[in-house]
Image (cartoon, rainbow, N blue to C red):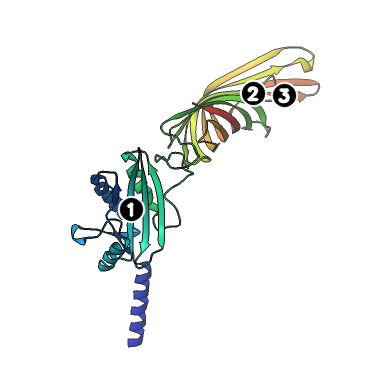
């Protein structure tokens, strides 16, 4: 029985050691060319964000520690005294108008860096997002620097353009409509123009589209003026998005009877509201020239007249029936940003 108890106790101790949160000693930040108050504020931010993350238990330095700023050996010794397994060193160096921030994570008694990164701050307002990224990624396989994020507020050394605030795109697109009710599946081509406002966390669109151009006895011409809002799933250069909008739509059905020995033109019009649901992908979102690929499903809230022909002997009877249209719309667009 004693052997079994010891076995379970050893198992629990092993599990606790595996899942125990590391204690990390936070050394005083080194401030070169900056007011020391910035260092105190940065340390408090680091403590708050690492605590929110929950991956480490942060042990802050105190005035009694007597560690030298930037002295790895004295910091290592103090981390051991406080039962920590790791320690963090940070340095903020002002160069002209910019501040270079450097963060390093060490294991105790090990000169090799476990994790490190450097970011450039344009002004003190950049310190907060920098420390947020560091706290979120320190000790992982990821860097705080993310070149895929086109909304990076830190002026990092990267060739990719950055964006702040709202950006508008104006452009045109090729569209296709595939009504499912009441027609058989048959793609109709068309054209469109659109304006897209990129507000980082949301995309707002206004577009005009027209499909099934020309005169046809088979299907109505579809014209839509649409206001929409979409949620982009990333802030990277290639951003998928999803959402929907509301359209004011016109449906024109043209009919000509010249095939039956007399020439008579008829045109029927219907208009009303239509719901648009869908999504797509924006390519080159960080640049001035943007491409967009989009697919939506539309549902009309009004009836559209369709011409129905039926033969009885040698006589062709023509009648009109109304249907609530629905189906798919596709678009491929090119736009210029302003």
List x then y, in percent, for residue 51.
30, 55
Q: Is residue 322 above or below residue 14?
A: above
List x then y, in percent, for residue 297.
56, 35
List x then y, in percent, for residue 113.
40, 60
Residue 325 visible at all: no
Task: Judge left or right: residue 121 versus residue 189.
Answer: left
Q: Are marks 1 and 3 in contact (CB under 8 Å)?
A: no
**What is the spatial separation of the Cα atoms under label 2 and label 1, in whole angstroms?**
67 Å
| Badge 2: residue crowd in 10 Å (few <14, some 14–19, many ≥20) | many
Residue 34 placement: quadrant: top left
Q: Residue at x 43, y 30 (%)?
A: 166
Task: Judge left or right: residue 24 versus residue 260.
Answer: left
Q: Is residue 32 above or below residue 55?
A: above
Residue tagged by mark 3?
309
* Sequence-wise first label, 1 or 3: 1
Residue tagged by mark 1?
90
List x then y, in percent, for residue 201.
42, 37
| Disc on res. 220 | 2
Q: Nearer the observer, disc 2 or disc 3?
A: 2
Q: Residue at x 78, y 18 (%)?
A: 259
- Label 3 SS: strand
């Amino acid at each position: 029985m004693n052997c079994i108890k010891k076995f379970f106790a050893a198992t629990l101790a092993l599990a606790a050691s595996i899942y125990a949160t590391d204690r990390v000693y936070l050394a005083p930040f080194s401030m070169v060319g900056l007011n020391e108050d910035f260092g105190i504020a940065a340390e408090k931010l680091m403590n708050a964000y690492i605590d929110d993350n929950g991956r480490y238990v942060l042990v802050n330095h105190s005035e009694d520690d007597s560690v030298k700023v930037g002295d790895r050996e004295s910091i290592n010794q103090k981390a051991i005294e406080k039962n920590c397994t790791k320690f963090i060193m940070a340095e903020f160096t002002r160069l002209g108008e910019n501040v270079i921030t450097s963060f390093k994570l060490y294991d105790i008694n090990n000169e090799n860096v476990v994790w490190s990164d450097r970011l450039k701050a344009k002004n003190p307002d950049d310190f907060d997002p920098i420390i947020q990224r560091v706290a979120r990624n320190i000790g992982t396989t990821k860097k705080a620097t993310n070149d895929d994020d086109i909304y990076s507020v830190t002026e990092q050394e990267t060739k990719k353009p950055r964006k702040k605030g709202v950006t508008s795109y104006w452009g045109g697109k090729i569209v296709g409509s595939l009504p499912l009710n009441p027609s058989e599946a048959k793609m109709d081509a068309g054209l469109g123009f659109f304006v897209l406002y990129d507000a980082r966390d949301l995309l707002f669109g206004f577009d005009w589209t027209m499909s099934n151009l020309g005169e046809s006895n088979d299907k109505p011409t579809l014209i839509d003026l649409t206001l929409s809002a979409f949620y982009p799933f990333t802030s990277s250069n290639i951003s998928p998005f999803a959402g929907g909008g509301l359209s004011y739509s016109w449906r024109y059905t043209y009919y000509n009877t010249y095939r039956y020995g007399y020439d008579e033109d008829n045109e029927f019009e219907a208009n009303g509201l239509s719901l648009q649901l869908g999504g797509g992908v924006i390519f080159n979102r960080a640049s001035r020239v943007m491409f967009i690929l989009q697919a939506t499903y539309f549902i009309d809230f009004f009836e559209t007249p369709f011409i129905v022909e039926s033969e009885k002997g040698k006589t062709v009877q023509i009648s009109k029936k109304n249907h609530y249209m629905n189906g798919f719309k596709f678009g491929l667009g090119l736009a210029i940003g302003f």
